[in-house]
Image: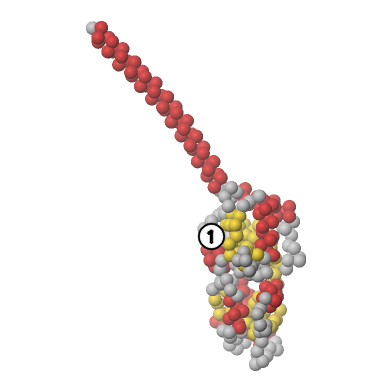
Amino acid sequence: MPYVKCQFMKNGFSSYAFLKGAFAFFILFHTATESLQANEHELLQNNTSTSRKAIVYMGNQPPYSFLNDQGEVSGTAIDKVRRIFAEAGVEMSMTLRPWSRAISMFEGDEMSFLMMLDRVPEREDRYVWISPLASQQFKLISRKRSDFIYKTHDDFINGDHKAVCFQNSSICEQLLNYGFKKENLVEVPNSLNNGLLRILQFGRADFTIMEENVLKWQQENFKGVWPFRVADDIDYKMTSYLAGHKNMPEDLKNKLMMAVKKLKFDQIDKTQK
């Protein structure tokens, strides 16, 4: 009988110890789980805020954005964008791509931005418009040809004259507005080199539209005799922006907007036409 009692007491003590240990384990596990969930929540918040590095995409559009002789992005709009992010305290990187690829890469990341994006009504709800970068005016450009005589507007758009533009660009739209027929447009993919002027130079098209400061930069940096001329002024003005992803984090948007206002970039700089 004493053996049975002793055994019973021993088993009871073991059960009590087990329950006590299990309870302690439950408390520790519950506490650890709450801590892990809190860390995960904090990490999630950090990954959707300004702790993540932003990326700014741009096309080749000198003097606003281009690669300099050292292979670095440069340009008047580049300097402005860097000042905005620096003032906002947001880390970012810049990359230059063919425009169509830049847009494709931009669409997949809510921390991404586009530079020198024309603000037109059909795009208004698709982006967050951070800051104007440049107010632009445009010219109708042609090759210099002794057999190509222009007298009136109708001389430009009648006949078989071809006009070249980048696919899905505002240039194509403006050429149509100017009066060129859809079938006379030569639509080409955007690229890093100056494709539109090259196409004019080699006679694949007769006209294109180009922003006046871009045209000036191209002429100053052209090697050889400049083979183009301004055929007509275009009644077309456009403001290009730094634009963000429509799903960008709210805190990032607020920081950048405050920086733009502080730098007074919300008003277009008339010297940056």
Image quarter of the C terminus: bottom right
* Image position, residue 182 (x, y; %): 56, 79
Residue depicted at x 67% and y 84%: 225
Left-right relation of 2 to 165: left
Left-right relation of 266 to 52: right
Give the amino acid type for the residue marked by disc 1 in the picture.
Answer: Glu
Residue under label 1, please give it: 107
Residue depicted at x 73% and y 66%: 272
Q: Quadrant of residue 117?
A: bottom right
In this orientation, does residue 257 appear? Answer: no
Depth order, front residue of 161/227: 227
In this orientation, does residue 100 appear? Answer: yes
Q: Quadrant of residue 77?
A: bottom right
Task: Using the image, determine if residue 154 lies above or below residue 175.
Answer: below
| The residue positioned farthest toward the front in the image shown | 70
Residue depicted at x 69% and y 52%: 87
* Image position, residue 110 (x, y; %): 55, 54
| The residue positioned farthest toward the top in the image shown | 2
Residue depicted at x 68% and y 55%: 84
